[in-house]
Amino acid sequence: MGEEQVPADAYYGLHTARSLRIFQVSGLRAHPLLVDAYMMIKMAAAQVNADLGLLPRDVADAIAAAAQDVLDGRLRDQFGVDVFQMGAGTSFNMNCNEVLANRALEILGEPRGAYKRVNPNDHVNMGQSTNDTFPTAMRVSGRMAFARLMPEVEALADAFDERGKAFDGVVKSGRTHLQDAVPIRLGQEFAAYGATMRKCARRLSASAEELEELGIGGTAAGTGLNAHPEYPARMVKRLSELAGFSFRLAPDLREAMQSHAPIEDASASLRLLALELIRIANDLRLLSSGPTTGLAEIVLPPLQPGSSIMPGKVNPSVPEMLNMVCFQVVGNDLAISMAGQAGQLELNVMMPVMVHNLLQSCQILQNGVRIFRELCVKGITANEARCRRYAESTAALATALNPYIGYAKAAEVAKEALASGKTIREVVVEKGLLSPEKAAEVLDPLPMTEPGIR
């Protein structure tokens, strides 16, 4: 391949230097969790290979110590390969191999680049291939990312539940097709949001479990060539100890290399979460619209001025932020889906873009949901007077008249109320269809928010 210049103070080597020169695409680097996952894999591999008598113990210990250095936050600037790189992630795998080899040499008192004692390919990459380590790192890092996201979704569900209880006595007009509908309690709307988030959390949990199946030990084509027969099972056990999850070995290592359905499924669960969050954020923007020319049934916490020209304007800034986060997640899912179906025969070479999008989606959702909960949902208040006025003036109250005067007459009452500007109660009493007392009882909006025939 010819000569390549490597900075004297670098811990990476020739392969990484070439990759840095060739793939100047986005300026985006590997997500920190992917680096962590790779360090765990390299540490586990060194220790397992030493236990199997294949790697000198002092070399294994030095590689493990180098990996621990990275896990502790050192040498992070040495992983600079662009996200959009050589297919399958070979550039990144070699970046990891070279950094660990040179740091291990340093630990052993040897000069960097003197690869006879610790070689990036022969020692750090022993029993491995990019083709099995990168899929494994995708699942390990994805599992770690989901572990950070899921508590935030559960906490958001709790926040909606709390607001649901606080607003349980606030009666308002329901709306279907964005038109007046029968009364509902504001607390019921928020409780439903909480139930939605709990369903999303369950989907995330199911997807996270699928990420725990690993294909480590398949090496180049899933056949396990150049890996000790005991290596796969021992690797899964050691990775479980290092990462703190119950990983299990895939029944078919070839399938685990060919198919990235667990990554696609994980991304799909993030997309469904994003779609539900978009819907809920838009509801909150609509319910808080105004404050004088919109619905104004709820008040969002004011966080910052909403206009550079209109004094006093306050916007629903956090729901707007959450929408943008979720739009990005939906787009990331499409990229993952396209990359997932692009696998060919024994390998999918589109893995780097898949894991980049998955981990980005997890991170921005984790932060976006936390901010949404802390700075928006927890501080929402109800405009009870506005809610009650809408509930008592809506023509949809005529629905409660059906059992008493029939649908046709109730429709006439509703039309007259809308035309005259009178309330349903006033019209039904004026027309002698119900006594004032009965009309007050039947048209009380609060009981209409519970099941039954009025």
Image: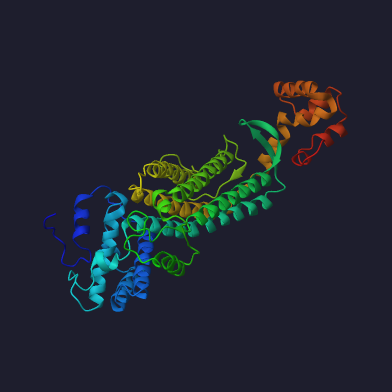
- The answer to whether residue 21 is seen in the rendering is yes
In the rendered image, residue 115, in percent from the top left (x then y), is placed at 19, 70
| Residue 321 position (above or below residue 72) | above
| Residue 6 position (above or below residue 440) | below
Task: Describe residue 342's horizontal placement relative to residue 18 as left or right.
Answer: right
| Residue 389 position (above or below residue 60) | above
60 and 185: which is toward the camera: 60
Name which residue lies at 33% across and 60% down: 225
57 and 308: which is toward the camera: 57
Q: Quarter holding the N terminus? A: bottom left
Task: Describe residue 21's horizontal placement relative to residue 454 as left or right.
Answer: left
Q: Quadrant of residue 333?
A: top left
In the rendered image, residue 335, in percent from the top left (x then y), is placed at 39, 42
50 and 138: which is toward the camera: 50
Name which residue lies at 58% across and 54% down: 378
In the rendered image, residue 99, in percent from the top left (x then y), is placed at 26, 66
- The answer to whether residue 31 is seen in the rendering is no
